[in-house]
């Protein structure tokens, strides 16, 4: 059995986990992050992509609102390349509750969220699809955030400060001796090897899996697993985040995210942390709800549906037990205080917008335990440095402005080598994924990353397969590269199958109209031209 | 009401099949061109609502519309690209080459004014355009290729006002003729023959004092001017359209603009223009189908190769000229079906595009040369003026508007 020694083990490679890894590393505390899958495979990528201004919580959850607006400003500063500063609108419809409107305005004011009313005519001009039922429109500093980019940027920054991480490494048990944490036992899911990791502190930041981790040693962390389903539309329908100005409910936020629009969400309690299959009734329900903000929404092409699990924390004294009623605040559970175990801390609840603050609180706690006095700097130090203008210009010249800008945002400091490769061998500049304009050079670069173990990992790193055709063309186009990386034709086929099944899972609930046509084309391509065998559905 | 505009709806229809790119004449010869799908629906998803400065490949599209003809999902690809160009012009970046290209766009877009100048003294204008020094200056100063086949000027086509003064009141049948700048200033003779042919078949022709249809302006980034021209021309046509008088175009690009772009303008006549505009041979074929086309043809013993202009293809009416000419005893005509000639309006006149345009046209040139060598035909026919000039430039084979053959058969011209 392999043994590793470090100071802190962080369990969970979501936004909170990587935020903690970065903070620890910046304070000079050696740390290792363990993730059972790929980074951001869970809640951190299965959300709206909304950087909250806090306005959504202004009435019900003043603390969450205040944290959101503060973190909103910080994240916009430290992670500019992951953010599109779209601003957001809260739209008050004709039949909506005027009482709520007043409370909301007061709440925003108290939380320090700047609100500006947009004249209706102006609003309809700027967002032509906005429902004509809109009566008043208010602008707040919402923005959109790319969960993948944000996580990668945190990890890369942590690595610079000496932090380490392992993906596909699943914690099997917590290692306790006499109520003292000694570390964890984990399994490398790629090699099957069991690893013993010795550490002084273990941080449980496993999101929806937090309860499972705590339960390994018999501790009860009462998590509510709340499933939120979302729809992805084929194009940008709005250029701002569009919220409905009412008590937060289902299907009342549209987020323009990169090339698509995301509508969500639903709210439903589930038992399993990975129950993320969207059902057809969720889809029709969301479309029905979405109609209030965008009429004739059913005319727009839906690419896929996906779901994420909100890890809501239910403190013991909580009087409310319904999904939307539970606070979006986070809680730090010191298991020494609660369960008498030294060195174990769980961080639960919260939301992506406040990931950095959660990380700061946890790291403060860890630092105090380890007698480290270095202060937190994550609110000031940007996650990346803008690549030099000449690299940027070269990229735009070689692969076109739209593709270059997106690639530079994904790769930033690593972009220079990719650009150089294209410059040397111009054919590497051709797009493997045309929908999202991902070049062959970038795919080759990503495949060299030791953390990329599969085509699906590649998708998360590059956006390959995330566009209109949902992997129809780019999957087979990446064949020679996959074969070189993964070694065998059988393995390449397996990678195809995993990626296409994953895409298919999201497409099936929205199989009508243009997306149905696309799927038929994909089926013809894979079943007839490439002679794939269809697997019978279990249903 | 569908609040989405057509482009939005059609963007959703794109299946990413790349049929358009496979057929794109520019993509065939330029490996760096992202192709109609790339430049159109792919990038459109990135462009929606946000301006991406510095997209240089936008100007590589020749606006031939082959992609739109090919698309199985009805995506308005060229329109998306033109829209993006329109947005790009409003963008901030102004560089020296930018200024030169804008000036060129101004000049090439103004076929009408150039025509008005050229016809003042056609002999001199033509001689000047033959001077190496002049062509060198045009290339250096404006980026207009030294080698490109700029069309020559001739005796202009006269405006024929409606004598009766009120549209539709005159007894007998009449048509409004939209000659287009090429016929008006470079090849007035074709227009005059057309009027005689129409007279022969019983139609009186009215030629109002139209401006340029706007297509060259659009293709060269002069969007506002294009719109103004459209509105002006529509207003001239309005009384005739209201009286149900058909509008005839002999230039395929003008015809396409009248059929496809004018209906989008905000003017009352825009509602009517699409349904009332006909390509000349389309109009003749409809008459033939109704049994109204005089068939008093003389024998014309000649063989021709035929090139179908891209903008006629885009009208989706097939090849009416072939159908009509094949009614004439003695005429043998072969549709070469060899793709775009490359010049596509003013694209092939641009210095940096000239070589690509010639490459695009090379399959056509080869088909023409082979046909002539094998004795299949001695002459080429095509409706589009610049296609004609380009075919002659690429092959030295005489090329005519098919109308001339019809005129011979009707005994209107004799050479």
Image: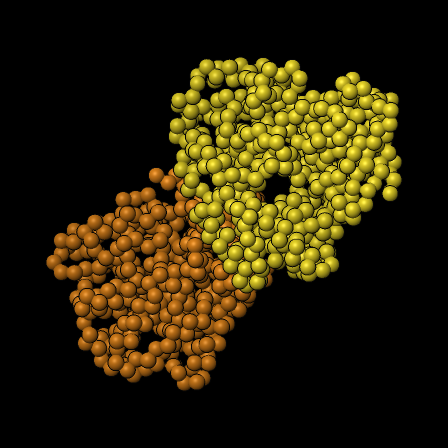
Chain colours: A yellow, B orange
- Please name whichever residue, B110 or B68, is drawn nearer the observer in this view of the structure: B68
Count of marks overlaid on the render: 0
Q: Residue furthest left?
A: B171
- Please name whichever residue, A360 or A415, is drawn nearer the observer in this view of the structure: A360
In the image, taking residue A455 as reference, residue B275 lies left or right, namely: left
Residue A365 vertical placement versus B7 (above, below): above
Q: Residue at x 42, y 40 (%)?
A: A298
- Please name whichever residue, B408 or A281, is drawn nearer the observer in this view of the structure: A281
Residue A94: x and y in percent read: 39, 23
Evaluate whether residue B353 shows in this view. no
Residue B102 vertical placement versus A62 (above, below): below
Q: Residue at x 78, y 20 (%)?
A: A339
In the image, taking residue A44 as reference, residue B98 lies left or right, namely: left
Q: Which quarter of the picture shows residue A145?
A: top right
Q: Residue at x 30, y 51 (%)?
A: B233
In the image, taking residue A357 as reference, residue A499 lies left or right, namely: left
């Amino acid at each position: 059995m392999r043994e590793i020694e470090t100071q802190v083990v962080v369990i969970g490679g979501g936004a909170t986990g990587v935020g903690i890894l970065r903070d620890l590393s910046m304070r000079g505390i050696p740390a290792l992050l363990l993730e059972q899958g790929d980074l951001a495979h869970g809640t951190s990528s299965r959300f709206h992509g909304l950087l909250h201004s806090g306005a959504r919580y202004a009435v019900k959850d003043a603390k969450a609102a205040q944290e959101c607006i503060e973190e909103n400003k910080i994240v916009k500063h430290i992670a500019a390349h992951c953010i599109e500063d779209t601003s957001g609108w809260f739209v008050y419809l004709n039949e909506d509750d005027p009482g709520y409107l007043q409370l909301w305005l007061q709440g925003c004011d108290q939380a320090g969220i700047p609100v500006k009313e947009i004249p209706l005519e102006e609003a309809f001009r700027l967002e032509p699809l906005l429902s004509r039922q809109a009566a008043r429109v208010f602008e707040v500093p919402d923005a959109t955030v790319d969960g993948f980019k944000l996580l990668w940027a945190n990890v890369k920054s942590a690595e610079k400060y000496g932090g380490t991480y392992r993906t596909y490494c699943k914690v099997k048990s917590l290692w306790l001796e006499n109520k003292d944490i000694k570390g964890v036992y984990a399994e490398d899911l790629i090699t099957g090897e069991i690893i013993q990791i010795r550490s002084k502190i273990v941080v449980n930041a496993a999101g929806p899996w937090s309860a499972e981790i705590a339960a390994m040693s018999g501790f009860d962390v009462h998590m509510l697993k709340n499933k939120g389903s979302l729809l992805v539309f084929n194009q940008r329908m709005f250029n701002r985040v569009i919220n409905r100005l009412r008590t937060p409910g289902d299907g009342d936020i549209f987020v323009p995210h990169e090339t698509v629009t995301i509508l969500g969400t639903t709210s439903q309690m589930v038992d399993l942390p990975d129950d993320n299959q969207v059902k057809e009734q969720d889809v029709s329900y969301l479309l029905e709800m979405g109609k209030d903000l965008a009429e004739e929404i059913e005319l727009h092409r839906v690419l896929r549906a996906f779901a994420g699990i909100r890890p809501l924390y239910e403190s013991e004294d909580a009087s409310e037990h319904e999904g939307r009623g539970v606070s979006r605040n986070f809680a730090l559970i010191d298991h020494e205080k609660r369960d008498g175990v030294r060195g174990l801390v769980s961080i639960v609840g919260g939301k992506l917008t406040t990931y950095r603050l959660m990380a700061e609180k946890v790291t403060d706690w860890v630092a105090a335990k380890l007698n480290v006095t270095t202060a937190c700097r994550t609110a000031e130090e940007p996650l990346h440095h803008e690549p030099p203008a000449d690299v940027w210009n070269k990229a735009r010249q070689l692969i076109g402005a739209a593709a270059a800008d997106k690639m530079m945002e994904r790769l930033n400091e690593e972009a220079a080598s990719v650009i150089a490769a294209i410059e040397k061998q111009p054919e590497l500049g051709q797009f493997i994924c045309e929908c999202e304009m991902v070049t062959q050079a970038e795919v080759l670069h990503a495949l060299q990353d030791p953390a990329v173990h599969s085509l699906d990992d590649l998708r998360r790193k590059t956006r390959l397969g995330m566009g209109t055709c949902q992997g129809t063309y780019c999957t087979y186009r990446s064949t020679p590269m996959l074969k070189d990386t993964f070694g065998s034709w059988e393995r390449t086929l397996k990678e195809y199958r995993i990626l296409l099944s994953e895409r298919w899972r999201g497409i099936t609930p929205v199989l009508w109209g243009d997306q149905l046509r696309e799927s038929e084309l994909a089926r013809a391509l894979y079943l007839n031209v490439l002679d794939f065998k269809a697997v019978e559905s279990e249903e | 009401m569908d609040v989405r505009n057509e482009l939005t709806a059609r963007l959703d229809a794109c299946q990413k099949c790349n049929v358009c790119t496979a057929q794109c004449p520019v993509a065939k010869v330029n490996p760096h061109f992202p192709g109609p799908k790339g430049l159109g629906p792919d990038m459109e998803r990135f462009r929606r609502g946000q301006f991406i400065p510095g997209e240089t490949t936008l100007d590589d599209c020749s606006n031939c519309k082959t992609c739109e003809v090919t698309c199985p999902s009805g995506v308005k690809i060229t329109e998306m690209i033109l829209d993006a160009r329109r947005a790009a012009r409003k963008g901030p970046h102004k560089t020296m080459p930018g200024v030169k290209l804008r000036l060129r766009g101004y000049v090439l877009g103004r076929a009408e004014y150039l025509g008005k100048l050229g016809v003042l003294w056609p002999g001199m204008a033509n001689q000047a355009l033959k001077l190496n020094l002049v062509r060198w200056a045009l290339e250096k100063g404006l980026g207009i290729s030294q080698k490109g086949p700029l069309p020559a000027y001739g005796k202009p086509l006269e405006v024929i006002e409606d004598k009766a003064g009120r549209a539709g009141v005159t007894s007998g049948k009449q048509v409004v003729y939209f000659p287009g700048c090429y016929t008006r200033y470079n090849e007035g003779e074709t227009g005059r023959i057309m009027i005689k042919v129409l007279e022969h078949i019983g139609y009186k022709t009215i030629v109002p004092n139209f401006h340029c249809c706007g297509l060259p302006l659009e293709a060269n980034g002069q969007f506002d001017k294009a719109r103004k021209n459209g509105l002006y021309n529509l207003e001239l046509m309005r009384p005739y359209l209201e009286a149900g008088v058909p509008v005839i175009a002999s230039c395929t690009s003008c015809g396409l603009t009248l059929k496809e772009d004018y209906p989008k303008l905000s003017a009352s006549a825009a509602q009517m223009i699409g349904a009332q505009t006909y390509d000349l041979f389309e109009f003749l074929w409809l008459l033939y189908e109704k049994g109204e086309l005089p068939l008093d043809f003389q024998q014309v013993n000649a063989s021709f190769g035929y090139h179908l202009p891209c903008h006629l293809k885009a009208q989706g009416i097939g090849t009416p000229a072939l159908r009509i000419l094949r009614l004439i005893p003695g005429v043998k005509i072969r549709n070469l079906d060899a793709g775009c000639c490359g010049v596509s309006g003013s694209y092939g006149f641009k210095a940096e595009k000239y070589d690509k345009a010639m490459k695009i046209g090379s399959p056509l040139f080869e088909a023409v040369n082979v046909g002539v060598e094998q004795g299949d035909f001695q002459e080429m026919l095509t409706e589009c003026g610049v296609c004609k000039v380009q075919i002659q430039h690429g092959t030295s084979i005489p090329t005519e508007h098919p109308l001339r053959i019809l005129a011979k058969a009707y005994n209107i011209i004799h050479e």
